[in-house]
Amino acid sequence: MPSERTPSAPSALISARVELARVALGAATAVEGVVAGNPGQTEAYVTPDGERRLVGVVAVAERGGRYSVDLCLTARLVPLHELGARVAERVRKAVDAAGMAERLGALHVTIADVEAEGAT
């Protein structure tokens, strides 16, 4: 009977909204061509996750227990329309694999900044 929660163990305290945001951001930033999440000019694309911040994603409740997920990303200099489509596809697959497909409502991908090759 373990009394401590391990970092990888799921927690009943994590809301479905935050978990969905986590999964979506993780999937999006794993796509080749995406540099990182971007908070947006007004830092509107940030989701609190305990003591951390998920930068580049916000999930908002919709009807029927679904959540709209908005991603704001910094990308490399690549064809952005195709990148956005790949990000959306990867996010949907990751959400499905996490068993949360019924929670995903609208999905929006915004590329807020483009980083040139070799930029730091």
Image: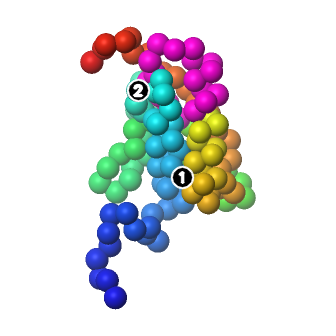
Q: How crowded is mark 1: few (under 14 residues within 10 Å), some or many (20 or more)?
A: many
User: Which residue is outermost to the right?
Assistant: 64
Closest to the observer: 95 or 41? 95
Residue that numbered label 1 is attached to: 20
Quadrant of the image for the C terminus? top left
User: Which residue is outermost to the bottom?
Assistant: 1
- In the image, taking residue 116 as reference, residue 105 lies left or right, namely right
Q: How far apart are marks 1 and 2 (CA)?
A: 20 Å
Q: Callout 1: helix, strand or loop? A: helix
x, y percent for residue 72:
49, 30
- In the image, taking residue 39 as reference, residue 19 lies left or right, namely right
**Which quarter of the figure has residue 44?**
top left
Q: Along the polypeptide, which appears first: circle 1 or circle 2?
A: 1
The correct choice, above or below, for 10 with respect to 103 in the image is: below
Q: Residue 28 carries which label?
A: none
x, y percent for residue 70:
56, 37
Q: Which mark is residue 35?
A: 2
Magenta residues span 71-87
Residue 73 magenta: yes
Closest to the observer: 93 or 115? 93
